[in-house]
Image: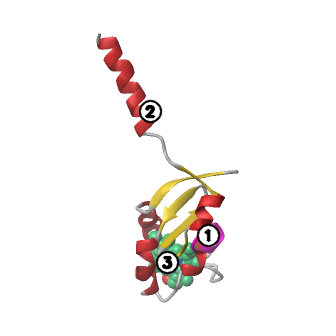
């Protein structure tokens, strides 16, 4: 009996622990300020709520909604500067899944 509980537990954990994967097709649909997803390296982030906060830093990130923003994020667009550690930590909060190639 205990054996079945263990098997059930392991199955449940593997299902709950699985990360959502998101394709380029799906990412592209979220290209407005109403729903703004961005891809940075291998992860997808829903930064809709963060748009207005970033506005206060005097840079509008709306044009990156629905795109692969890896380069833009790492170079702060064309400024060539990288985001701070604080920004990288903050970004984690908005992660919604892993990017799926296809
Ligand atoms: C999508 C592409 C993005 C671009 C092109 C971009 C660009 C910029 C620029 C130009 C600045 C202001 C100039 C400066 O402080 O040096 C800035 C500041 C900042 N951004 Fe972004 N940003 C992006 C996305 C994000 C995201 C998604 C977050 C966090 C969720 C974020 C967090 C911050 C923070 C905290 C600052 C203040 C300065 C720092 O800590 O580095 N940014 N960003």
User: Which-is-in-front pick, marks 3 and 1?
Assistant: 3
Q: Secondary structure at mark 2?
A: helix
Marks 1,2: beta carbons within 8 A: no
Give the vertical position of 34 relative to 3 (above or below): below
Query: Between residues 59 and 84, which one lies in front from this camera angle?
Result: 59
The first of marks 3 and 1 along the sequence is 3
The image position of residue 41, as x and y in percent, is 61, 59
The first of marks 1 and 2 along the sequence is 2
The first of marks 2 and 3 along the sequence is 2
Alpha-carbon distance for marks 3 and 1? 15 Å
Question: Which residue position holds label 3?
Answer: 33
Q: Which residues are magenta?
A: 65-72
**Label 1: few (<14), some or many (≥20) within 10 Å?**
many
The image position of residue 81, as x and y in percent, is 59, 78
Question: Which residue position holds label 2?
Answer: 14
Can the viewer see residue 76 in this picture?
A: no
Mark 3 C-beta to ligand 1 under 8 Å: no
The image position of residue 45, as x and y in percent, is 50, 63
Q: Residue at x 54, y 59 (%)?
A: 44
Count of labels in the image = 3
Query: Between residues 61 and 34, which one lies in front from this camera angle?
Result: 34
Q: Is residue 78 magenta?
A: no
Question: Which residue position holds label 1?
Answer: 69
């Amino acid at each position: 009996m205990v054996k079945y509980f263990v098997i059930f537990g392991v199955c449940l954990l593997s299902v709950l622990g699985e990360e959502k994967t998101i394709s380029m097709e799906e990412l592209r649909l979220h290209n407005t300020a109403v729903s703004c997803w961005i891809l940075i390296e291998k992860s997808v982030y829903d930064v809709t709520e963060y748009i207005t906060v970033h506005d206060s830093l005097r840079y509008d990130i709306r044009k990156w909604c629905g795109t692969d923003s890896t380069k833009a994020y790492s170079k702060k667009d064309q400024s060539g500067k990288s985001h701070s550690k604080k920004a990288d930590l903050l970004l984690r909060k908005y992660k919604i899944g892993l990017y799926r190639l296809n």
